[in-house]
Image (tube, rainbow, N blue to C red):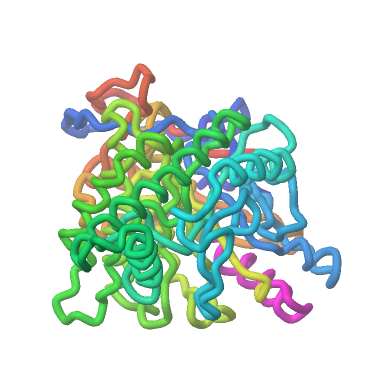
Amino acid sequence: MGMLMLKHIFFRSFVTSSGATQAAFLFLLIPCCLPQDFTAPPLIPSVSFLWGWNVPTERCATMFNVQLDLSLFSITGSPLKSATGQAITLFYADRLGYYPHIIENTGASVHGGIPQLGSLEKHLEKAKADIAHYIPTQGLGLAVIDWEGWRPLWARNWRPKDIYRTLSIELVQKERNQLNATEAAKRAKVDFENAGKCFMLTTLKLGKSLRPNYLWGYYLFPDCYNHHNRDPNYNGSCPQIEYKRNEELSWLWNESTALFPSVYLTSKLESSPNASLFVRNRVQEAIRISRVPGATRPLPIFVYTRPVFTDLDLKYLSEGDLVNTIGETVSLGVSGMIIWGSLNLSQNVQACTELDSYMKNKLNPYLINVTLAAKMCNQVLCREKGVCARKNWNSSDYLHLNPGSFTIQLENSGNYTVSGEPTLEDLQKFSEKFYCLCYANVNCKERVDMTKIRTVKALAH
């Protein structure tokens, strides 16, 4: 049995130079024809699945002398306002131009409140300066705009966001007092959606023009609105009307260069089978929307997740919860995941110590597990020219290492030891349960011929 001493392994090719443990297998599987599906090529060529860390944990080292090991993550970025030059730049409402919105708990209007009353010219002028400040160089990265005040579709601004509809109608009635209530509401809908669309599109265009090497998109877009998990017949699917509404946002998908959906869990979904259904359908909807710009040029998808529950922000996810979030997402074949967290995770030495322990003993071993399994599958089925995805997206098939073939252990040195080799049965399972999503614009064969001897090489970095 082979043994690999690994510090961190995710960002190397699964095929290594001489000295790597090798295992040759005779594949006796029936060749299968792959569907004509494509996925976006990776942001970093050698990283088929990108892990991002978007948590303000620099405080753990600088204030509490707790050194978190973040080397599993290809890109990192602190969401603190003072942080600049980050590979993940999160633009909150107060960090990108003059975003018109209403403060929910006070009702105060900021920069006009509703988009119709915002100054687009002043917004873009300020946004240009903000982009230069927060992204001072032309390197690679992710630019995530987090505008959650209002939603660009009128119908989605339900309580408490219906204040945007109310104020929009009042504005129309003030300017056109001859209109009756029905006419004013219709006019307000058009005005609101046009103004909101203009703010969102021009901001994207500006960002792309100034920092073209960053991938730009909006956090929580697309959304699925499948939160009705108390329904006894809950299957995770998005309400039918929300599929249609997402299609109405084709203008947004065509201008975005990445999608950033979210799969945050509440404690109601702790250790619940509904959690996997919730996550699975949200990610699958993002995959569907990613193909709106064109089936052969899909948008990359980076799914936001949290290590804790949204309503219990110091309670960490169990391994089962990690399977329901991270495991689901990796098995569907997206481009990567971004782990986000609040200041609560680094507010004092105890919080930092608990986070460090959680990462070492639960989170990092699971990330190693799914990433190695995905890399192995990508090599076998895709020849590293694509990524593995479930044949049946609505199944419970996961890209996991077989515990009978592999063990992952944390050594005293801080390194992880991965021991084992894949068996023929392990690789057969990949072929039976997964298929290859080829990278767009890459010469990737549609048929996988597994009747020849193949060599699978394990990592030795």
Quarter of the rendering occupied by the C terminus: top right
Left/right placement of residue 48 relative to residue 33 reads right
Please say if 298 is above or below 447: below
State the image coordinates of residue 159 (x, y, percent, origin top left): 35, 76
Residue 318 visible (yes or no): yes
- Nearest the eye: 229 or 324: 229
Q: Main secondary structure of the magenta part?
A: helix
Please say if 28 is above or below 6: above
Please say if 322 is above or below 395: below
Looking at this view, name the residue that lies furthest to the front.
178
State the image coordinates of residue 265 (x, y, percent, origin top left): 42, 72
Left/right placement of residue 185 relative to residue 323 reads left
> What residue is shown at x 61% (from left), y 26% (from top)?
18
State the image coordinates of residue 355 (x, y, percent, origin top left): 66, 72
Looking at this view, name the residue that lies furthest to the top.
443
Give the residues in magenta.
346-365
Please say if 42 is above or below 53: above
Residue 401 visible (yes or no): no
Asked if residue 167 lies in the magenta stretch, the reply is no
> What residue is shown at x 58% (from left), y 47% (from top)?
3
> What residue is shown at x 49% (from left), y 51% (from top)?
337
Asked if residue 356 lies in the magenta stretch, the reply is yes
Quadrant assignment, res 153: bottom left
> What residue is shown at x 51% (from left), y 63% (from top)?
113
State the image coordinates of residue 438 (x, y, percent, origin top left): 33, 29
